[in-house]
Image (cartoon, coloured by chain):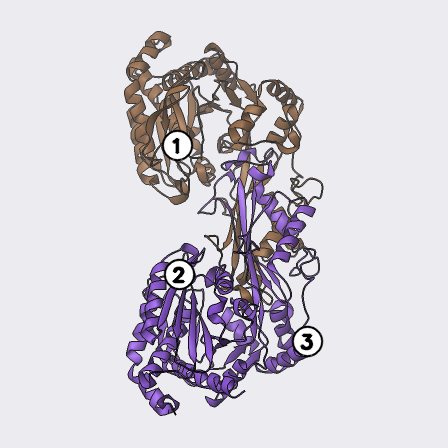
Chain colours: A brown, B purple
């Protein structure tokens, strides 16, 4: 028996190294890595490669893609089972955000945030440099103890998760031989909410992001170059009004203003099956909708939904969200101009069996049929020439890796809420779809919040059932052991 | 006979001083004076007061208002007639603009801009520090020659023309006794287009600017504080979509997307009378619509209008223009957020007999009746508690000051295009309305363009019929003489 099977010994080893482990998290956050701005990505990729070497990978490589590089590492322990570990090393933008607990989101601080004596505040703290480093800290500790792990690991760390992973799937397809022996995929994250409750998501929604631009140039009406003086408005038409009117046709139901009135938008939706309904009903009894509303700063949900109905809407309904809109002068006071262009950032959350390509076609056809064919649909193509977006992903609840995750949580005293999918998006489809077609679990004790928002944090020192860094690390150690068992004794 | 009646002598005197006169314009532009940002206003007011002293005013004063100060000057020459001179010393914002001919719009340069060997480029060059300084240069030259003018002048220079002159009317009302002896008002501007054609505008449109804000906070739906993660969009409603949908109800005519579908919006409009129609028909023969389109960078006018119909629409139709709209994330790439608020800047150009108050009521009632009563209408009140806006203004074509202007242009070899009003707005109503109720002309040879826009310029050295700075100054000299004659021998 490996020494790592002795829980006391592992916990002690982690605790002895805790100061160093915290510093490792801080160091990783200090390296900015904003894909949307191509800021610090190269430097962070090198840092991650060094971390892979530090945990014991014998092979590491920074693979080039048409976008940001993918960092690969192979930790071969001669074990029977190989697990793919999916990591992301990029983070969300911080521009325009007002952080209150740190001056610079890339100068993280360890601060008190009751009920927690210590949390790390900084961009990427919980999404996802904190959990990523916790996992690597755990691996290095296990290697220190035993010189090997119960499973072999193959790491894939991408640097453009926050911009929809446009090249991850292409990378996987190109290098599929590298992963032929992988049995499952794990993504280390912090899965506890502030009460310590654990969630396990069996898949995710997809997302398709696009811009619409209305300009005098492509319309042939309105100002074609710069903005003009607004006194000409009686004779010169406005691309801004045109975009507003075009958008309004997309949510134009007189009864339900939330209904998307784009033909074909809802055509590919699959209603929840029997098994999903059962999961939803169990889940509805445990989810505290008031506390979700509270943490979001939202007074009322759509139609005051709660319970199973709220969950079904959250997880099975696609959305057409406006991330932002901008045209003309938006500074202080006023400015008498008639702008020459207007732009809106739209986002569609995709549920099975929707696809970005079909949504793109539906939106384009909608604009054309309503007489707005000149409005440009700006969306990037991926490596395969398809509309960029991330697909939704589904993992079978019966797969050994899901069972290993549930077992681990239960051994550690937690009864996880099992979600048929998450409302958000992660690039899980790159692994769950062919050619790999692997089951995938997002796993980890630990808590943090405010992903993408100011004062993002990750708990270092837990409170009550909420685990801190050491507890998170220990949960990863136990998961690896249970994965080895699940795949060796099916 | 005053020596100034000798044209050669005056022209020579102006030309001798031309370098100094150019430098005076540059100096005035170098002093930023952006009312919208309260930038440099105090400094510019002092500079203007010193200019009033320099031209020979015996009384000068900087009057405080609830907003930016008004600079007053009295140049008493013991003449029979007193003329009020309206000036503005503030300029438009430059933020976000890309100037190509100067690095800093407040570091003006004299550059070649064919067909002109010399133009001044900088913020305020033509709107309106160039013409203002040209007028003051002319006055000072006349004073140098004769020690007096043919009329007495009372200067009113305001510092918030570009933010709708919220306190000018209040100032006039409060100090009406100061202006009891004024017979007419002149505003020095550059009235020539690039071909040298002269326009004379008998009044102007009004303008009413306001913001609409939709927020989760006042709506009770959607995020009430910060933006939230967009994965919650199925359950959390969007203030941005709501603002878009609300706006779309304001231009919702299926046949004419330019028609404002706000009840009462067009109620107060007065169709052009017989005299106005005659002016429009004469004007239509002279206006070159293609060259207007060209200079605006517009391929087509609304419904391809031209001639009298285009002029009638331009001058007699109110507009509901979007100056700008902003919500959420508008930087590079995408950001998966659901914004908590959205704001739009609207602008209504008012024609007789519309009023800002009635438009405000119509818009507010429109929002309420369409179920958007929570959308805030943000408009500032003026000193009298009325919705801020500038009224339209009308001047009688038969008034002596209009006749003096026409005579001056004709003496100088120009046949002015007479417009019943301008499509734009100036705070003329403060003078044309009671208590003063004075006729007003905007006057001046000279040319410049790109007011409010990047690379705004004012011609220093004319070409063909386009007069440069010296020609502009001379036209002001002649106007004052003709005003004296018109009011002394009616």
Q: Nearer the viewer, mark 3 or mark 1?
A: 3
Determine the CA span between mark 3 and mark 1: 68 Å
Q: Quadrant of residue B135?
A: bottom left
Which residue matches tag 2? B98
Mark 1 falls on what kind of element?
loop
Quadrant including the C terminus of chain B: bottom right
At which x and y percent is residue A259?
Answer: 66, 40
Residue at the spot x=28%, y=77% of the render?
Answer: B20
Q: Quadrant of residue A3?
A: top left
Q: Nearer the viewer, mark 2 or mark 1?
A: 2
Please, which chain is the residue tagged with disc 3 on?
B
Mark 2 falls on what kind of element?
loop
Q: Nearer the viewer, mark 3 or mark 2?
A: 3
At which x and y percent is residue B466?
Answer: 43, 82
Disc number for residue B33: none
Determine the CA span between mark 3 and mark 2: 43 Å
Pointers 2 and 1 within a single chain: no
Which residue matches tag 3? B273
Please, which chain is the residue tagged with disc 2 on?
B
Q: In the shown orientation, is residue B345 left or right of residue A86?
A: right
Mark 2 packing: few (<14 Cα in 10 Å), some, or many (20+)? some
Which residue matches tag 1? A124
Mark 1 packing: few (<14 Cα in 10 Å), some, or many (20+)? many
């Amino acid at each position: 028996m490996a020494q790592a099977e002795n829980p006391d010994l592992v916990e002690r080893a982690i605790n002895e190294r805790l100061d160093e482990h915290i510093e490792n998290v801080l160091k990783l956050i200090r390296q900015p890595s904003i894909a949307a701005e191509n800021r610090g990505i190269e430097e962070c990729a090198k840092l991650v490669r060094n971390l892979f070497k530090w945990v014991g990978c014998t092979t590491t490589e920074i693979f080039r893609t048409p976008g940001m590089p993918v960092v690969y590492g192979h930790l071969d322990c001669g074990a029977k089972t190989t697990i793919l570990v999916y990591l992301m090393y990029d983070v969300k933008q911080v521009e325009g955000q007002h952080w209150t607990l740190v001056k610079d989101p890339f100068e993280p601080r360890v601060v008190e945030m009751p009920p927690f004596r210590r949390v790390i505040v900084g961009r990427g703290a919980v999404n996802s440099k904190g959990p990523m480093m916790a996992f690597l800290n755990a691996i290095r500790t296990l290697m220190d103890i035993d010189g090997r792990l119960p499973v072999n690991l193959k790491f894939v760390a991408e640097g453009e998760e926050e911009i929809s992973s446009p090249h991850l799937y292409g990378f996987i397809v190109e290098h599929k031989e590298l992963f032929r022996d992988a049995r499952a995929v794990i993504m280390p994250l912090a899965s506890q909410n502030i009460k310590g409750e654990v969630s396990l998501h069996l898949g995710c929604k997809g997302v398709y992001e696009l811009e619409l631009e209305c300009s005098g140039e492509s319309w042939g009406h309105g100002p074609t170059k710069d903005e003009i003086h607004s006194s000409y408005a009686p004779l010169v038409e406005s691309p801004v009004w045109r975009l507003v009117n075009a958008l309004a046709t997309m949510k134009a139901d007189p009864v339900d203003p939330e209904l998307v009135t784009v033909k074909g938008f809802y055509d590919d939706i699959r209603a929840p099956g029997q098994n999903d309904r059962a999961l939803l009903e169990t889940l509805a009894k445990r989810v505290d909708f008031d506390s979700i509303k509270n943490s979001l700063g939202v007074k009322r949900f759509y139609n005051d939904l709660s319970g199973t109905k709220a969950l079904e809407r959250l997880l099975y309904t696609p959305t057409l969200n406006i991330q932002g809109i901008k045209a003309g002068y938006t500074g202080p006071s006023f400015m008498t101009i008639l702008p020459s262009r207007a732009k809106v950032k739209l986002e569609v959350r995709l549920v099975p069996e929707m696809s970005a390509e079909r949504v793109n076609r539906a939106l384009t056809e909608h604009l054309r049929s309503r007489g707005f064919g000149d409005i440009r649909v700006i969306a990037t193509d991926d490596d395969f020439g398809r509309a960029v977006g991330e697909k939704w992903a589904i993992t079978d609840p019966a797969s050994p890796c899901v069972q290993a995750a549930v077992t681990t949580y239960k051994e550690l005293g937690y009864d996880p809420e099992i979600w048929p999918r998450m409302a958000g998006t992660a690039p899980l489809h790159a692994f769950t779809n062919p050619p790999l077609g692997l089951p995938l679990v997002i796993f980890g004790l630990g808590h943090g919040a405010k992903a993408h928002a100011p004062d993002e944090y990750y708990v270092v020192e837990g409170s009550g059932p909420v685990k801190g860094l050491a507890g998170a690390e220990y949960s990863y150690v136990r998961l690896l052991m249970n994965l080895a068992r699940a795949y060796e004794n099916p």
